[in-house]
Amino acid sequence: MSQSSRTVLGDRLEVPPVRPWAALVVLLCGTFLANLDVFIVVVAMPALERDLGAGGGQQQLVLAGYQLVYALGLAAGGRLGDALGCLRVFGLGMAVFTCASVVCGAAPTTAVLVAARLFQGAGTALMVPQVYRAAQTLFSGAAQRRAYAAIGAVMGLGAIGGQLLGGWLLSADVLGLGWRAVFLVNVPVGVLALTLLPWAASGHPPVQRGPVRADLPGLGLAAAALGLFTVPLVAGGTGGMLWWGPACLAASVPVACCFLRHERALDARGGSPLVPPQLLRPAGFRRGIVLIVLINCGLAAFVLMLGLLLQKGLRWSPLATGAGLVPAAVAFACGSLLAPRLARGAEVRLLFLASLAATAGYAACAVGALGDDPRQLLAAVCAVGGALGLCVTPALSVTLRTVPEPVAGAASGVVSTAQQLGAALGVCVFGFLFFAQVRATADVVAAFAVTTTALTTTSAAAAVLARGLPRATAPAGPPEDAAGAPVPRDLTQ
């Protein structure tokens, strides 16, 4: 083996480099399943109520429990990737997620199903940050932008394709499994990813490391702050938040301040904080995080509202509703894949223009829903999907490109947490607005028009924020071999 085709791990033995694109493809299985399981369960709620007797509160736990544990564990998952190697942590997360999916599919009671969904969320929190770390450490320049584009496209396909696949599985009643197939469909994908992972990593031997210094107090404070902030929003979206809701929201602020103070003190002592303070110093990273929250807030709320419009307003079946979301999924995927070519180093300008396009698309959807021509609504839906697809990739690139490599995993965890919190905010806030309109007017179509009009605030704010993003230059790429080709970095480090 030539010196140029080997990666040196300090004073350790040299090992073959990873296959970067093969590794990314395997890791993208985790991204796909993570987003799929947020949406695929929605169409199974009536079947769960019928077969397991799941009431409204239990259904909410099945839906929200997964996403809350997912969001709360992402920062820890990113930090573990830094400490143990992202391929190893990804494999652990995929194993937990796959086993939990088996338990979900075999659950005899709602309580077992809810518990298994929590473990699914934990497995996802371990998997997802490793995908971003791989994109940042394995690629540079144009290849890195294509990697981010692939992540964005897979996210959109998983999110919108979840309702299509769920509708088809319920309608076809595959193997007589009913709603259980919605969870068991994860198993073959998980097994395939775990089987291919060693090959994609080129058979790296385990890297010997010292003991991992876990920031348990920081993890506890972060979980408390995020929990105090998100749980009242989930409860409020179903009318379950009483006096304790505002109290929890108010308490989340001082707890978050305590978390930041703890992280700064731990970093000053030479420890390993969950969120290194240097992550929050660059203005580009801070603005990028807010931008990611806004984009995902609009995306998640729009997909949910569109599904409700098609099923409750237009009386489509679950399968037909899923099929109706396919054009938006295709437009989103195309936008994500085209973004690197359109940006060509001008990600900030593309973010601004795409956010304006999404604003116009939301407004057109409101008009199209009230009109008599479904083609007008379909065109507006495709416009929104394409515009948001153009936003996702440059937002990730602008946010992560200035992050130092030693804390890349922690940054990935923060970015993934921002995505999930944005989605939770969108579903809770705009879902609350939607159902309030339905109760007031008994008109689902009008409620969709009002809610979609309100969604323009998210994309308009994103456009304003994008104008203030710094035109940062990309960090230096990886070392090159004798032929000038980049040598992939070792993901087990």
Image (tube, rainbow, N blue to C red):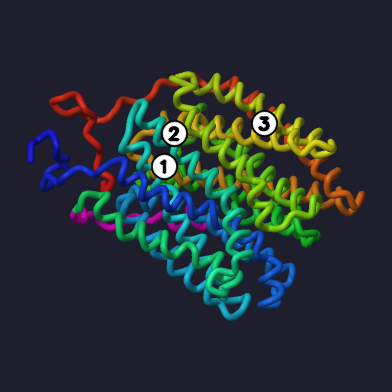
Q: Residue at x 64, y 35 (%)?
A: 382
Q: Residue at x 14, y 37 (%)?
A: 5
Residue that carries the numbered disc 3 in the rendered image: 459
Which span of residues is magenta-colored?
205-220
The image quadrant that residue 123 belongs to is bottom left
Question: Looking at the magenta stretch, what is its main secondary structure?
Answer: loop
* Total residue callouts: 3
The image quadrant that residue 459 belongs to is top right
Residue that carries the numbered disc 2 in the rendered image: 400
First-in-chain label (1 vs 2): 1
Foreground pick, 384 / 432: 384
Residue that carries the numbered disc 1 in the rendered image: 132
Label 3 crowd (10 A; few <14 / some 14-19 / many >=20): many
- Identified by mark 3, the residue type is Ser
Q: CA distance from mark 1 to mark 3?
A: 24 Å
**Can residue 286 be seen?**
no
Q: Residue at x 59, y 52 (%)?
A: 226
Q: Secondary structure at mark 3?
A: helix
First-in-chain label (3 vs 2): 2
**Residue 209 lies in magenta, yes or no?**
yes
230 vs 491, left or right, is right
Label 1 crowd (10 A; few <14 / some 14-19 / many >=20): many
Label 2 crowd (10 A; few <14 / some 14-19 / many >=20): many
32 vs 364, left or right, is left
| Contact (Cβ within 8 Å) of mark 1 with mark 2 | yes
Foreground pick, 143 / 368: 368
Q: CA distance from mark 1 to mark 2?
A: 9 Å
**Can residue 313 be seen?**
yes
